[in-house]
Amino acid sequence: MAILLSVVVIFLVALAAPFLNKLFKGAAGWVLSLVPLSIFAYFISLIPLVSAGEVIKESHVWVSYLGINMSFYVDGLSLLFALIITGVGTFILIYGGGYLHGHHQIGRFYLSVLLFMGSMLGVVLADNIISMFVFWELTSISSYLLIGFNHEKEDSRKAALQALLVTGSGGLAMLAGAIILVQITGTMEMSEMLNATGVAESPLYLGMLILILAGCFTKSAQFPFHFWLPGAMAAPTPVSAYLHSATMVKAGVYLMARLNPVIGGTEIWFYTLTSFGAATMIIGAWLALCHTDLKRVLAYSTVMALGTLTMLIGMGHEYAMKAAAVFLLGHSMYKGALFMVAGSIDHEAGTRDVRMLGGLRKLMPYTATFAAIAALSMAGVAPMLGFIGKELVYEAALSVHAFPLVLITIAVVANIAIVASCGIVAIRPFYGEQKETPKHAHEAPISMWLGPAFLSVFSLVFGVLPFLIDQSIISKASAAIGGTPDLVFSLSLWHGINAALILSIVTFLSGVGVYFIWDKIRDGAGLQGFGKLFGQVPEKGYDHLLSGMLSFAGIQTRFFQNGNLRYYLITILGLTIALFGFTLFTQSGTVIPTDFSSIYAYEWVLALVIVTSAFVALRAESGLVAIAALGVMGYSIALIYVLFSAPDLAITQVLVETLTVILVALVLIHIPKAKMQVKPSSKLRDGIIAGSVGLLVTLILFAVLDLEFDPYMSEFFAENSYVIAKGRNIVNVILVDFRALDTLGEIVVIGVAGIGIYGLIKLGKSVLKKEEA
Amino acid sequence: MEPLLAIVVGFLFAFSIYLLLRRNLVRVVIGVIILSNAVNLLFFTVSRIDRGIPPLIPAGEYVPVGDIANPLPQALILTAIVIGFGLLAFSLVLTYRAYKELGTIDVDEMREAEPRPQLKKEGK
């Protein structure tokens, strides 16, 4: 119950947030942060259980007839994520309160952020894969609301829609993949999928893998879907710090990690994840250097981190699992801190453009200090947690079974750019000559440096004292990713002088070098061309796809709904011919009757008269001829009814036919003859369509007549007509007794038609002509 | 007799569809008349027909004596004939009114509700 409660409470508080905001005014952020803080404390209390190797499960019936339960599952991996979500979330609420202080829609901000927090917690805790999908989509929706927070700006709206469409369509693909996975494993609970065997051998494996990875790659901004993430920087900075670096974008990584023991371990898994991951890593890292906007630099470095995590999960060996867990935690902490710092700078100095910033250290001493610590962790400098993480990444890349040299080269080159980005984000704005900024800068309020303070200081503490986290939680998270429950290890800063350490030193020194020449290379052709190719081309592709879809919809609509009655009919009839004809010829086959011997000569004549008179009506140039022909046809049909035991039908037909002829004659007098030009080709087309329909109807009738007739209903009426309803004319009894309500409906229809006719003739002189005048 | 009527029904369908595809609204209405007759006849045919045994119960009997024609489709067709007439009367008068209002009976010219598509670019 407790886990469900922890998710539900957040949703409830989310709904109450706008009111709490009114109640507590400026302190609302602090008050609301107590919610994630207490849930954070609850999850901390689960650490001893989980580190002892237990998994906590909880299941609630939701949609029982589909087997969908609201079930939860806490192991090392979900616990690590839950702690990051609630821990960072606590500071984000506090920070958001300061950052958006006085904003007229801050209540909505709290609502959306808490909505997201609950959804994200649901994603990482859910055991049932369908429940997980529901939470997954909720994160996309809350992300949409948050990116579009400044909805007056067109850029915000566009970025929000872009993020929603990219992650949403990926999410749909993932749903399909999840359903296939359920088919293969026979269970919806991810904890039970771990026991499934033969997943990789299933013929559905490849399709399932592509669909699920489509969801993960779009959500976690892997190349070439990475473009939505920098766009999402249109969101207020607390949102970027939370959703678009520490948590939501890691949902795809989470799912890959969670399913790694089930669907991973194959060659295709290895090559897909390592190649997409490595490409994302190096492209993201260097795209960061093409920009001078602090948030964009950070966004692209986040893309790099997501690529790193994807690559690590793909590698599949023990080092990689360790590295993934450590890097995940390390990244969430330093990146969350640095985003908040970037927001503080923007908030206090009025710009995020690094070219306009400098020497803020004296004005913003706390922010500068914590930025520096966080940046050291990001750059992977000892003794930070980020250092341990990067060492492990290097070791993982070195010990991979295929192409270790390629992967380690990519990792080093990517990390060089990251070191340079650290300098751009944490050194340049604070050191050097003090520059004139749009706003006169001063230190941010405590709400805005508390988060960076905690996150950066703990990056240091965990680095110096790794035993605080290694066996209790990191080991268990790695074990869950690898599917090896017994994995236990210790972390340490010093591994002796080995290849990874040397590479780290090389990385750091080259990174510093790149930082110092950054001003020179930034606008150079090389980096700008790189930015165009990998930053703008995928986004252009998205734009073209979107506008292509819209214009395709336009063309399709104009084609099918062109307002021309005949084309509508042709479409409907064409489809009817195709579908009925296909079914008839493939399913039942055609039957051609050969026995016409029981038909009397006068019946042949009657049939010929009906067809001929109808044809005359079709060909008639003058209305009068058509009326006469129609009359002949109608009376002949009445004769058919007479001959074949239907006297009531014959009487009705004669009456109606007489009325019809009179009515048509009355109307046609008022309408002049009109000759309308029709191309011979369209006459031919109409003839073919009409002929096909006629042929099809005849063939269907032949097929139906070949079947046994079931007289059950008719016998019922015959037997009960007199006994129950006291009538000897069975047809009449059916009409006025057994199916009296139908007849009443019929009378109503005729009445309505009569009223309509009266209205058309008598009322409202001329609507259209009045409008024109 | 049923196979012959099946062929007749096929012809009536073909003629009526051809008329429904004309530009002249009067001919469309003639198509409607033929179509409603064709459908009635179709229904009559599929429920099997017999000569000279109307579905009546002789005086003094409680149930029909011997074979009778199938009464149920007859009841349904009777309804259909009447409804068909209602439809026809309404569409005839609608045609008349449309001619009075629009001055044409060319269905291609009647574009008040769905004007011709504008081929200019969307947006901007």
Image (cartoon, coloured by chain):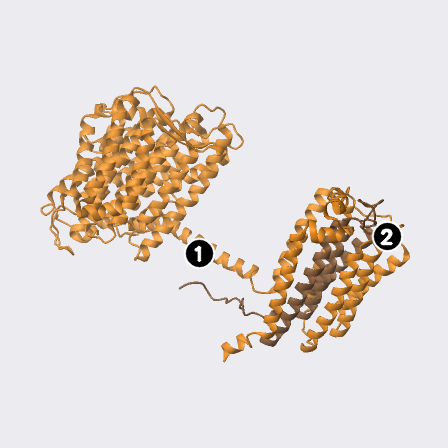
Chain colours: A orange, B brown
| The residue positioned farthest toward the bottom in the image shown | A773
Q: Relative to B72, is A5 above or below?
A: above
Q: Are marks 2 and 1 on the same chain?
A: no
Depth check, front residue: A702 or A288: A702
Tell me the quarter of the image containing the N terminus of chain A. top left
Reading the image, the residue beneath label 1 is A547
Extreme front residue here?
Answer: B60
Residue A646: image quadrant is: bottom right
Q: Is residue A522 visible?
A: yes
Left or right placement of residue A279 versus residue A745 in this view = left
Q: Position of residue A497 (x, y in %)?
A: 22, 24
In the shown orientation, is residue A655 left or right of residue A409?
right
Residue extending furthest left?
A362
Q: Which residue is mark 2?
A: B52
Which of A206/A654 is in front?
Answer: A654
**Residue A756, position as x, y percentages in the image:** 60, 67
Chain letter of disc 1 in the image: A
On screen, A395 above or below A150? above
Query: Which of B65/A239 is in front?
Result: B65
Q: Secondary structure at mark 2?
A: loop
Mark 2 packing: few (<14 Cα in 10 Å), some, or many (20+)? some
Which of the chains bears the disc numbered 2?
B
Residue B66 placed where, x, y %? 85, 44
Residue A694 position, x and y percent, is 74, 56
Label 2 is placed on what type of residue? Gly
Crowding at mark 1 (Cα within 10 Å: few <14, some 14-19, many 20+): few
Identify the residue at horizontal 33%, vertical 38% (top origin): A120
